[in-house]
Structures are given as C-alpha cells and as structure tokens.
Amino acid sequence: MISIQNAVLRNPVFRFREPVSLTIEAGEHLAVTGPNGSGKSVLAQLITASYPLKEGKIIYDFYPSPVYENIKLIAFKDSYGPADSSYYLQQRWNSQDRDASPLVRDALGYVKNNSLRKQLFELFGIDEMIDKQMVLLSSGEMRKFQLTKVLLTEPRLLIIDNPFIGLDIFARKQLCDLLSNLTGAGAVQIILLLAKTDEIPGFITHIVPVCDMCCGKKVSRDNFKNEIPDVPVIRELIPPGVADNQVGCHVKDYSGKEECSCHAHVGDTGGTIIAMRDVSVRYGSRTILKSLNWTVKRGEKWALLGQNGSGKSTLLSLVCADNPQSYACDISLFGRRRGSGESIWDIKKRIGYVSPEMHRAYSENIPAIDIVASGLHDSMGLYVRPKSEQFFICEWWMNVFGIMALRDRNFLQMSDGEQRLVLLARAFVKDPELLVLDEPMHGLDTVNRLLVRSVIEAFCRRDNKTLIMVTHYERELPGAITHRLVI
C-alpha cells in the first residue's frame, strides 16, 4: 500500500537521524509509539508527503485516486479546532466575535454517504451540537467534530495523532469501538500516533517504535515489548526541592548564587478564593450552567469533572475572568465581587492557567524561555523584557519540567507534547495563589505524565495554595485532592 524507501527529509529541522524505510501493507493497522519529541508527528508528515525529500522515495498504491484523497491526518491541534491569526483566547466568550463563527452544520458541509452520516452522528452526538457555533465547542466536542468530518470523507488510510485526548471515558470507548468496526469491515486502514502505550487498541496489528528522531522497525503486536519506567526511575528525573515542600517557595540557584523568591503575589492565609451564587450561563436558547453554587476556600484542591460539553470550560472561563457573562452573575473572586472595579489583570496575576484553548491560541513562534516568561505578565507573547532574576526563575521551572534543552527553540518547532510542557512551566512560573489546570497532561508520554503529576503533588503540599484540575483520567489526579465538583 505504501513503501517508504531510504527517505531523508530536505529540512534538517525535521530530519530523522537515519534514512527511514517503512512498508505498510494492506490490512495492517499501525501504532506509532514513542516519547514526546521522538518524531512520531514527523513520521506522519513523511507518510503524507507533507515535506519534500532530499533523498529516497515514497511509493503509494492507491490507484486510481490521487494520494491526498486517500490519506487523512488528524493532527494533535486539530482536537482544539483550527487556529488562525485571528483566533484569541477569549474569542469563545465574546458575543461579537462568537456570532461570526460558523455553525457545526455549515462546517461539516455536504455529506454523500447518508448511512455513514447517521452512524457517526449517533455515535458522537453530532445532532445535539449541529446548530452550535464552532467557537463554542468544548475541546472534547471539537475532537468529535474533527473525527466525524474526516471519517465522512471515507479515506483509505486515516492517521490520528493521540486519538483519545480530550474525550471522556464514554467517548473513548465509542471511538475505539467505531475504529474497530471500520477496520474489521476493511473500510479503512488506521495509523495511531500514541504517546501513551497503555492505550493501544485491540485492532492494532503492528507497532512502529520511534525514539530520539530514529524510526524503529515495524514489529507485530505480539512481539512488541511495552517498557514503562517504574516510579523510582521517574522520581530521579525531578530536580532537588520539587518533590518535597520547597516547590515555588524559594528557588535555589544550584550554581552557587544566592536564593531568589519567586512569589508573584502573596495572599492572605485564609479566606475565600471563589464564591458563586445561583450562577447561570446561557448562549441563545442553550443553558450551559444553571443555578450553580460553588465556594472554593484557600488551600482547597478541587477536581472539576464532567462529560464532554458539560460546561467545565465555561465555568473556568468565569474563574479566570475571560467570560464577560461573569459581570451579570453573583461571583466573587479573591474576596471581591466581579464588577466592583477590579480589572481582569488584577485577577489573572493571581492565577496560573493552562488549557486546551490556551494551547490552541498560543501560536507565537518565539523561544521557549520567552513563552515561560510571558506567564509572569499573563500575556500571549513577551512584551515586557524580564529582569535577569526573573529569567532565572523561568529557567528553574523549565528545569523542573525537564525542558531546559528546549530553552532557545522556537515554539512552533517543538512537538505538541514539548509545547504542553512549556505551557505548564508558564502556568507555574509566578508561583500563583490559584492554579487552574484544564486537562494539563494532553499528549504527554508516560514519563512526563508521572513527572507533571509529581510536580502538582508537590505544589499541593503547600496549605496556602489552591488547585482546580480538570481531567478525564482519574489516575492523573493528585492524591491531595480534597473536593470534587461534577457538572
């Protein structure tokens, strides 16, 4: 079906260390596995002929249709929706820009196969959001939309990068069952790019391991050895001070210089962080939140849970001062009623935040160190040059997340998992009073998930720090969670 023969990409930035040779036979379904930054996405781009070759060749057997009609790729960021230069973080919540967004119905376009359309619409609940504006889709709903739109084109080969990110437990099972049925019927061949090797579906026949920009040999599923590092090895990756009670308090300069504090704001030791009373949010005839009462005290650690489209991101938009509807609601943040004269920046300076929407919006192609530093001023780019001691704090947090090697690499030249680690360092860099993590481990491999969870655990050991975390995986939650809100 596809034969890649000693292929070498022309662009050295995306080039594998050795020429790539890979054959994909009819009836095979592959999982490309490997850690963040290993080259999984580059291999997908190579298979789709997205980059020109310097050497070698790729042979496609898709007669009589052209290659591009037979191969479809759903990339990592497709799960967040198409981000162009006009997209910004608060666009989803501002009515003027929201009204200009197309409806799901229009974005899907004309569908030829009505039988497949009915099957996919029922599976992913598309009818329930068919008249919803695209910009209002949650990350999970966007994932369902993207999968539906691509599957309706009936490709011969479908490549999906991290297929289960953003999906709740029910949607993950539905997707797995659907792909299993499609492959069983011979309707499509599948290649999955997986950072989490514990999510390899049963229909996968072969594994292609990728590591350190080297493409390994294709092996049958029965011969694949899934080697997951144990916890002691993971903990050795965490810099001194992070796994105990020192994270964020005083950053030690291990080169021997004096310590410097990384407190951006020191709040009261007691009090209420969030108070919502009978809060409702509506968009047209749709009610997203209804009569919600929620109080978060300083030092509490909350898990915010719910199915795709339940309103979790809408609720967080009220907390993070991104949603103008908060002015019409009875909401107090950090002891002040919304609309009482505080600016959104007065609120944001006390919050560290990462989310799928932020990842989508952050398209600044600037070095990783500048991305992290932008968290000091809550900007989507670096417009205020940090002082030398602030740069040191940024570097310390990059070291915590194991990404110092990315310090000077531009954001858009990183893998999606590497980008997520940079955005996590950005969320922690000002040592916030309130840490809001909306699905923080999207696209991370096993080692990095355990590392990030350990950093969150260390943060949670501090009594005056407050956490709100969203995830669809129970095992990602830190053990320090004190409260749960299910919406």
Image (cartoon, rainbow, N blue to C red):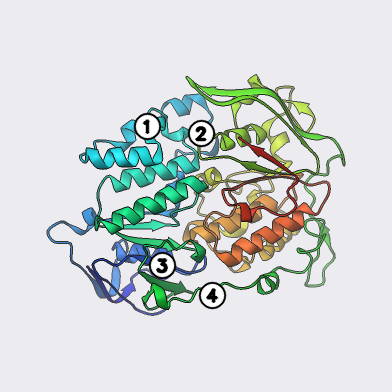
* Label 3–label 2 contact, CB within 8 A: no
Q: Quadrant of residue 297?
A: top right
Residue 421 in the image, given as x and y percentages of width and height: 59, 58
Callout 2, which amino acid? Gln
Q: Earlier in the sequence, mark 1 or mark 2?
A: 2
Q: Earlier in the sequence, mark 4 or mark 3?
A: 3
Q: Is residue 16 visible?
A: no
Residue at the spot 48% in from the left edge and 24% down from the top edge: 96
Residue at the spot 67% in from the left edge and 34% down from the top edge: 319
Label 2 sits on residue: 91
Within 10 Å of the Cα at label 4, are there few (<14), some (14-19), or many (20+) other Cα atoms? few
* Label 4–label 3 contact, CB within 8 A: no
Q: Earlier in the sequence, mark 1 or mark 4?
A: 1
Q: Secondary structure at mark 1?
A: helix
Above or below 125: residue 456: below
Q: Earlier in the sequence, mark 3 or mark 1?
A: 3
Q: Residue furthest left?
A: 64
Q: Quadrant of residue 400?
A: bottom right
Residue at the spot 48% in from the left edge and 43% down from the top edge: 140
Label 1 sits on residue: 127
Mark 4 vs mark 3, CA separation in Å: 15 Å
Q: Is residue 72 left or right of residue 469?
A: left
Mark 1 vs mark 4, CA separation in Å: 42 Å
Report the mark closest to the observer, 3 or 2. Answer: 3
Q: Earlier in the sequence, mark 3 or mark 2?
A: 3
Mark 3 vs mark 2, CA separation in Å: 35 Å
Callout 3, which amino acid? Val
The label number, if any, that marks residue 32 in the structure image: 3
Label 4 sits on residue: 227
Q: Earlier in the sequence, mark 2 or mark 4?
A: 2
Residue 321 in the image, given as x and y percentages of width and height: 65, 32
